[in-house]
Image: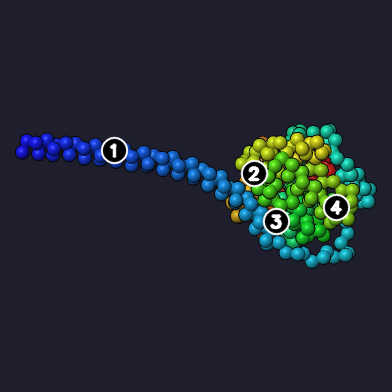
Amino acid sequence: MYIYGIENVNIKRNNKKKIIMICLIILAILAIAILGGMKLAQNVNEKKLIAKNENNAQESQNEQEISNKPNNNEQTNLPTEEKEINKEVNFNKLTQEQINRINTIYQSNEKRAFLTFDDGPSSQVTPKILETLKQENIKATFFVLGTMVKSNPELVKRAREEGHYIANHGYSHVYKKIYADEKKPLEEYQKTNELIRQALEDNTYQSNVFRYPGGSYGGYYEKIKTKSKEVLKENGIAYLDWNALTNDSDGADTKEKIIKNLKATCKGKNSVVILMHDAPNKALTAETLPDVIQYLREQGYSFKNLYDIL
């Protein structure tokens, strides 16, 4: 009996050790799983952010429709001399002095507003924006997408003839393509610039100013963007972001929200470069533009486009 008692005690001790070991293993597995899950969630969030931007661009492209040809009776608002000056400005690469003017665009003693529109032109929205600008006698800057220029060349031509600056937003707006390496932004710029030339029927045209999809700073592709800026500079191309926005592409789904974001981001600034969009799904932007203009005028801003500083 005594021997059996010792054996029972040893069995119990061994069982206890086994249970403790199993518990420790389970705890270790749980810890590894939690850490792995946190890392996975972080990676997924980053990929979701990139995918969201790419999907938004793709959605805009999918919604585009081929516009009707413009009325042949449409007349340009620019005198002949001014049109010739505009062509002269865009004929060559920018000088370092001109690039510096873009780089210091946010610095001004006078109150001035640069209205800029990305991701167009689109037959659904751009004509409405152009009509409002014509009525208000305001010249804006359009950062056009190559894919949209290809579908709506007549709108690019109309915008330029009415005195607006045609700048460059790349061809695809698909991040994994445009930021594949530091040379890709220049390639997308050049591809879009050629399409702009075809639309304008002007082989001398240089858009000269590039806007990085998603902005030139931060984000998943920041290192590539930084390297690509030197490539652009070597080719006499400036890049321009914004320092005010309406959030019309990121949650502002009412006129009230658009104006609220405009007020918040313009506050305390003399020179504002305002980000808006004329993609096919931005009808609200066109509807709110008169209110945007009215607010800026009430605050004492005069309206400029890139021709005014180049």
Q: In the rendered structure, which amino acid carries the disc numbered 1? A: Met
Camera-side mark, 4 or 2 = 4
Q: Is residue 36 above or below residue 151?
A: above
Q: Name the residue under label 1.
A: 21
Q: Name the residue under label 4.
A: 197
**Between discs 3 and 4, the one toward the N terminus:** 4
| Quarter placement of the N terminus | top left
Q: Mark 2 points at which residue?
A: 263
Q: In the rendered structure, which amino acid carries the disc numbered 3? A: Ala
Distance of label 2 from label 1 (alpha carbons): 62 Å
Q: Which secondary structure lies at badge 1?
A: helix
Distance of label 2 from label 3 (alpha carbons): 23 Å
- Residue 171, given in percent of the width and then of the height, sits at 74, 51
Q: In the rendered structure, which amino acid carries the disc numbered 2? A: Lys
Residue 93, numbered circle:
none
Viewer-proximal residue among 275 and 57: 57
Camera-side mark, 4 or 1 = 1
Q: Which secondary structure lies at badge 3?
A: loop
- Residue 240, given in percent of the width and then of the height, sits at 74, 41
